[in-house]
Amino acid sequence: MFDAPLDTWYVWLGLGLVSVAVAGTALSLPTAAPPSPGPVADAIDEVASSPGSARARVTLSASRIRLAPRELALRSDGGTARARFAFGPVTPVDSGPLARVLHGRPPASAFPSKTAFRDALRAARRESPRWRPAPDGLTARRVRWGDVDATLVG
């Protein structure tokens, strides 16, 4: 007398809607964990805090990256994760003379003067960070030219 009649249409419709909602929730969950930016930020901090010139290359396990002077963000199918640099600011590098210095050339061979080098560093730090496809690895290099000291990352 108090049973739900299983032959009525609204019981089957409700059961179908609940099944679709549960399946949709299960399928929308991420299939992987977000990338871990901590080890990448730690490697960059190690280069930035070194007493002399230093260099490091770190592999990335993310599909997108956003590099700012004080923060690194990585994104993948599992989500987005961020890490702040303890020894910043760093100088994000894309291309041009700073990229040549990042990859091993001395600043004196890429820039006409220390002032031009300092201006390029300031301009690179002022650029607005944006999401871009993540490379396989990220290179960090600490460079000094007289009183101009910088950690380049790209």
Image: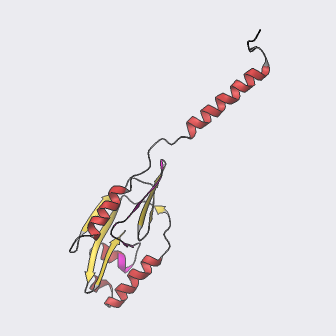
Can the viewer see residue 59 in this picture? no
Q: Residue at image x 36%, y 80%?
A: 97
Q: Is residue 60 above or below residue 89?
A: above
Q: Quick one: which residue is furthest to the top in this view?
A: 1
Q: Please tell me whether residue 147 belongs to the stretch shown in magenta.
A: no
Image quadrant in which the C terminus is located:
bottom left
Residue 16 horizontal/vertical position (percent) = 69, 26
Tell me where residue 135 sits by quadrant.
Answer: bottom left
Residue 69 horizontal/vertical position (percent) = 41, 71
Q: Is residue 71 above or below residue 53?
A: above
**Direction from residue 119 to residue 77 in the image, left or right:** right
**Direction from residue 130 to residue 146 in the image, left or right:** left
Q: Residue at image x 46%, y 78%?
A: 126
Residue 111 horizontal/vertical position (percent) = 33, 86
Q: Which residues are magenta?
A: 78-98
Q: Quick one: which residue is furthest to the left in this view?
A: 52
Tell me where residue 101 sits by quadrant.
Answer: bottom left
